[in-house]
Image: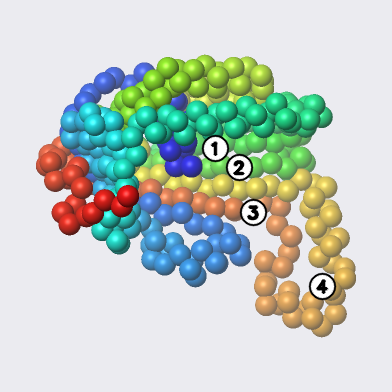
Amino acid sequence: MKSYIRFAVCVLAAALAVPVLHADVKTREKSLVKFEGMLGGAVRMFGGSAAKDGITSTVAIKGDRMARINDQSGEIIDLHEQKVYHLDMKKKSYSVITFAQMREQMEKARADAEKRAKEMKPEEKQQMEEAGKQLEFDYDVKQTGQHKNLLGYDTHEVVMTVTAREKGKTLEEGGGFVMTTTMWMAPKIAALDEVMQFQLRYFKAVYGESFAMDMQQMASMLAMYPSFKTMAEKAQAESGKMQGTPVSTAMVFETVKSADEMKQTSQQSSGGASGGIGGLLARRMMGNRGQPQQRTATFSTQTDRLSIETTVSADDVAIPAGFKEKK
């Protein structure tokens, strides 16, 4: 899943045509993902320190190698060898997969997806197309005017809000979701462009012509769904407000109930088991949480850049000493 997410990000980066640098860089970053509700409680209870405090990773690029390592796992990509090394930091072991094997997996996944699409019933296809047509997206980027010193840079705050709602209705009327991203932008840091550039080189080396084909397919998909095409156009128009390099990024994803859903939820919460002494005690214990909320945070992420260096040693991108290959 992470590979596919990085692939989508790289497709976007390719469209923006960032200049090629091919310079060495090493950076440390801390990331934290929080889930809300019962799922969030379970994750915090059983997820260990990573779920509570986040994960600190080191990303290093030297020549044709990039390493991304934290205290639990790691990945080393070698463009010259055309191999990816997956590290288990706890067991001090690693496994290897070649670019050729990755291409085979990709082709199999593509074939399986095409097979499922062919087996889909006509009414199911129509429902999917209608769902895309019935969505409208609002995209907004605002400069707040706030400044903060981070990593020695004078950063400014930018808030990006993406809203999906039912076509022809407000968010409160038809429901939907809101994704709010708050970024502290430093002046452009050229060294960090190399991280994205390496990812682009990596995906092109692995997938070759398929990489360009997938970009074309993504464009075709946007053309099929006007709402997504409109969102992409709005995003491109607003992107000029995000000049610089983000060194701290926080994202909150919220779901919003429609007016009809709120009405149904209110009726359910006011009747049945919620009445009587038991219901009264439950509401007192929960406070406002016992009342239906139209807007609910589902999960959030926080990513902070901790350091940036341009001096990288061979050891920074090498398999740690004492690690053994797991066949």
Q: Earlier in the sequence, mark 3 or mark 2?
A: 2
Could you give the CA–CA distance between mark 1 and mark 2, rounded to whole angstroms? 7 Å
Residue at disc 4, secondary structure: helix
Per the image, the residue denoted by label 4 is: 274
Disc on res. 245 = none
Could you give the CA–CA distance between mark 3 and mark 1, rounded to whole angstroms? 16 Å
Quick one: label 3, few (<14), some, or many (20+) residues within 10 Å? some
The answer to whether residue 60 is above or below residue 129 is below
Residue at disc 3, secondary structure: strand
Could you give the CA–CA distance between mark 3 and mark 2, rounded to whole angstroms? 10 Å
Q: Earlier in the sequence, mark 1 or mark 4?
A: 1
Quick one: label 1, few (<14), some, or many (20+) residues within 10 Å? some
Q: Amino acid at mark 4?
A: Ser
Q: Earlier in the sequence, mark 4 or mark 2?
A: 2
Relative image position of residue 157 (x, y in whole percent): 40, 40
Residue at disc 2, secondary structure: strand
In the image, what residue occupies the spot 41% across and 54% down? 32
Disc on res. 161 = 1
Q: Amino acid at mark 2?
A: Val
Q: Earlier in the sequence, mark 3 or mark 1?
A: 1
